[in-house]
Image (spheres, rainbow, N blue to C red):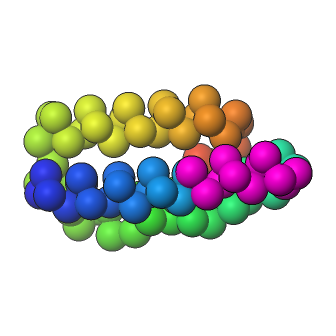
Amino acid sequence: MSGHITALLGSCARTLYGLCVLRAHGLSQDCLVQVFCSTVLAKLLYASTAWSGFCSAADVNKLNNFLYKCKKTVSLQTTCFWHY
């Protein structure tokens, strides 16, 4: 499962970098949050109920750290996470 988490977080990190580039080019905060929820959060949540039971504590820690980084980077409000 660790390999899946590593690949998933790598893909999401690349998308998060793209969001930072879009913000630098003038994308509004509301649009930035919408794109984040539609891309990064959707990747993290897709079939998560199926694979989350197989995650180790280290994998869960990696996911939590990445979400904390996302919250700081995108300046997320909690409403984005309750959207799903």
Write the start and end of the magenta stretch as one range.
17-27
Main SS of the magenta part reads helix
Residue 40 position within the rendered picture, expressed as x and y whole percent measured from the top left: 52, 59
* Residue 36 visible in this rendered orientation of the protein: no
For this rendering, which residue is in front, 37 or 21? 21
Please say if 73 is above or below 25: above
Question: Within the image, what quadrant is residue 76 found in?
Answer: top right
Q: Is residue 80 left or right of residue 69?
A: right
| Residue at 38% from the left image edge and 32% from the top image edge | 65
Q: Is residue 65 above or below residue 8?
A: above
* Residue 35 lies in quadrant: bottom right
Q: In this view, does 15 lie to the left or right of 21?
A: left
Residue nearest the observer in this picture, 51 or 28: 28
Decide whether residue 19 is among the magenta residues.
yes
Where is residue 23 shown, x and y percent of the image? 77, 48
Which residue sits at x=20%, y=61%?
A: 4
Q: Which quadrant would residue 54 be assigned to in this image?
A: bottom left
Which x, y percent locates residue 36?
Answer: 63, 56
Q: In which quarter of the image is the N terminus?
A: bottom left
